[in-house]
Image (cartoon, rainbow, N blue to C red):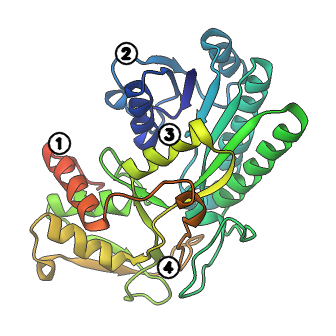
Amino acid sequence: MRVLVTGGAGFIGSHIAEDLLRRGLEVAVLDNFATGKRENLPQGVRLYEVDLRDKEGVHRAFKDFRPTHLSHQAAQASVKVSVEDPYLDFSINLLGGLHLLEAARSFGVEKVLFASTGGALYGEVPEGERASEDWPPKPKSPYAASKASFEHYLSVYGQNYGLKWVSLRYGNVYGPRQDPHGEAGVVAIFIGRLLEGKPVTLYARKTQGDEGCVRDYIYVQDVVEAHALALFELEGVYNVGTGEGRTTQEVLRAVAKALGKDQKGIEVHPAPPRSGDLERSVLSPARLMEKGWRPQVAFEEGVARTAAWFKGRSAPSPG
C-alpha cells in the first residue's frame, strides 16, 4: 500500500503521514507549503512540492510515486478567506481537487480519503440537535460549498470509474502543530495569545459580548484514528466529532486553565459575528462509532496536551 497525503506538511496531514509510516506503509507527501511547514514533515517521507492547481505537476507526482491510495487533506481551509475570495477557494478546493481525481483515475488509485467538513457543511444545527450524515448540506460559505461539491465529484468518480472513496466530515480539529495564524484554530490562537500576555478577540454568536459560537471540538489524534479505520475498512460519508458543543468562551476558560492563567486577568475584546460563520455546529458521530471508533481524548485533556506542546515551542501568536 502506497499512500500519497496531500497537505502532509500541514497540521492534520502531518499527523496522518506519521501514523501511516508507523503502520509500515509507504508514504509520500504533496504540499506547496502555502501553510504547511517543512518541520512538520516526518523523517523519511518522500516529498513532492507541488501546488494542486498545477495539473502537470500533480500528474508527474502520481506518475512517479504510483500511489494505491490518496489521502486528500490539502485545502484552502479558511471560511473568512473563502468569503473574501471565492475564486481562490474554488481554484484550490475544486479545480485542484479535480486535478487529483483525474490523476487518480489515470494512475490506478484504488481509494480516495477526503478531508471534508462537518463543522461548516450542514449549516446551522438547532439547539439540542446533532447533525448526522443524512442531513442535507446547507453551506453558508464558499468553503463549505466547495467541500460539499467535491463530495459529489467523489460520488460521480465512484459511479463512473469505480473509484472507492471515503469522506470524513471533520468537526473543529485542534491539537499540536495547529497554526495560530488564522481564524480557524481558536484553541491555538488563544494559547498563542495568552502565552504572550496579549488580549484575545471573542467573536459573537449573535450579539457582541455573548459567549461566542458553539462548535464540536475533536482532538487531532482521534481524527488520525478515524482516518486509519477509513483507510482500511470504510467507504462513504462519516462524521468525525464528539457530539458535544462548546462555546468560544468555554474554549478560552479551558485554555486559561491549561496555562495556569487567571481568566479575570485576560483582556478580552468582544467582536461582532463574522461573515460566513455558523452560530452552532455539533455533529453526530454515531455512524463512525458503530464501526468501532470512539473519541479517546477528552476536551480538557486535549487542550492541556496542546498547550504543553505550544509552551515547549514558545510558539508566537498572531500580531
Q: Which tag, 1 or 4, sits closer to the chain's start?
A: 4
Residue 43 drawn at (x, y percent): 33, 19
Kindly identify the residue that appears in the image at 63 percent across and 44 percent down: 234
* Quadrant where the N terminus is found in the figure: top right
- Give the Cα separation between the discs numbered 3 and 2: 20 Å
Can you tell which of label 1 and label 4 is closer to the viewer?
1
Q: Which residue is mark 4?
A: 273
Question: Does residue 194 appear anywhere in the picture?
Answer: yes
Q: Amino acid at mark 2?
A: Gly
Q: Which tag, 3 or 2, sits closer to the chain's start?
A: 2
Give 271 or 59, whichever is nearer the viewer.
59
Determine whether 181 is above or below 197 in the image. Answer: above
Q: Which mark is residue 44?
A: 2
Q: Which tag, 1 or 3, sits closer to the chain's start?
A: 3
Q: Which residue is mark 3?
A: 228
- Give the Cα separation between the discs numbered 1 and 3: 28 Å
| Mark 4 Cα-neighbour bin, 10 Å: few <14, some 14–19, many ≥20 | some
Q: Which tag, 4 or 2, sits closer to the chain's start?
A: 2
Q: Which residue is mark 1?
A: 313
Determine whether 200 is above or below 10 in the image. Answer: below
- Give the Cα separation between the discs numbered 4 and 2: 44 Å
Determine whether 181 is above or below 102 in the image. Answer: below
Kindly identify the residue that appears in the image at 50 percent across and 54 percent down: 292
Kindly identify the residue that appears in the image at 52 percent across and 28 percent down: 32
Can you tell which of label 3 and label 2 is closer to the viewer?
3
Residue 137 drawn at (x, y percent): 73, 67
